[in-house]
Amino acid sequence: MNEAVLNLVQGARLTPTQRRIAHCLVQHAAAASYLSAAEVAELAGVSQPSVTRFAMALGHDGYPALRRRLRELTATAGAESADDGNELQRAVRAEMANLDRLAGELADRERIAAAGRLLAASRPLPVLGLRAAAPLASYFAYFAAKVHPDVRVLDDGGSLLTDRLEQAAAAGASALLAFVLPRYPRETFEALREARDAGLTVVAITDSPVSPATEYAELVLPAAVGTGLVFDLHTAPMALAMVVLQAICDASPADTQARLEAFESSAARRQLFLG
């Protein structure tokens, strides 16, 4: 059902308030088609007229028409899922759909290329990922360090996080790559505010085009998170992280080649790998 909501808002030009409403509907996808306009307004922390304007921005006469459309989509999704195997198979197939959607969005190569240029030029390159996003930040940074001279992983919160952001900016950083995934830690957004105050351009890999990260990032790259199991699946965000790393390599091919060759020479000398 959250996929149905995302499909409705995909490509729509929404205000920050309308993005908050869309995000609320995604978060309450199972009940979204049964909520009244007043209930949606209360959940999203907005006024009821804002919910009406949101529905109209999506091409509907009002919120009741949008709710009817959500119910139609819910019924269609339920019929399709009946023949889609057990819950484990459905979770994996949903990840396949997330990857397929990501592949479609990558048709616009300029957005990814722009992210690559911004991040390649940042020396050092801070990479932010807290709680559930921390493993993705570390995974990206492990490989990025082979082609970028100074990658700094920011995966711990607390007062030291602001220190490390300020230190990165003082050392010459111009951009920050942030992994912003549910359940959106408050400290992540505090760090994004600090990053912008320090003059860093924020590139965010997040789960949705209506993610709260859109309020803080100059460039938002969405990749859906799987929600079919007890804990989220991050297949699409991880794939997008490697696509962004490819864009960094493409932004500076000569430096990339030189650094990779230097690493391979060092690895061979030290016999790092068995094969």
Image (cartoon, grey):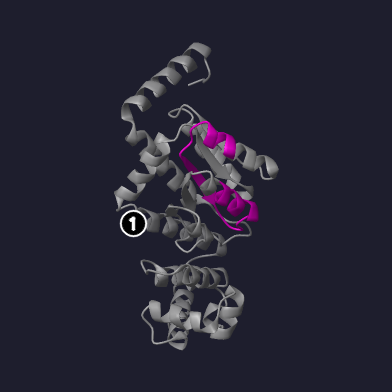
- Label 1 is placed on what type of residue? Gly
Does residue 137 show up?
yes
Camera-side residue of 93 and 107: 107
Left/right of residue 58 with respect to residue 226 in the rendered view: left
In front of the other: 238 or 149: 149
Please state the horizontal and vertical placement of residue 38, each as a whole percent of the image: 57, 85
Q: Is 163 located above or below residue 65 in the figure? A: above
Q: Position of residue 151 (x, y in %)?
A: 51, 32
For label 1, count other residues whose C-alpha is less than 10 Å away and answer few (under 14), some (14-19) or many (20+): few
Q: Which residue sits at x=39%, y=20%? A: 261
Residue 1 belongs to magenta span = no
Which segment did they paint magenta? 166-194
Can residue 1 be seen?
no
Residue found at x 39% / y 45%:
115
Q: Quadrant of residue 76?
A: bottom left
Q: Which residue corresponds to the image point at 36% horizontal and 39% vertical from the top-left?
A: 117
Q: Could you tell me how many numbered marks the image carries?
A: 1
Residue 104 placed where, x, y %?
Answer: 33, 57
Q: Is residue 65 above or below residue 18?
A: below
Q: Could you tell me residue 265's position as x and y percent?
A: 43, 15
Residue at point 48% right, 71% down? 81
Element on which disc 1 rests: helix
Question: In this rendering, is residue 243 above or below 40?
Answer: above
Residue highlighted by disc 1: 104
Which residue is most to the top?
269
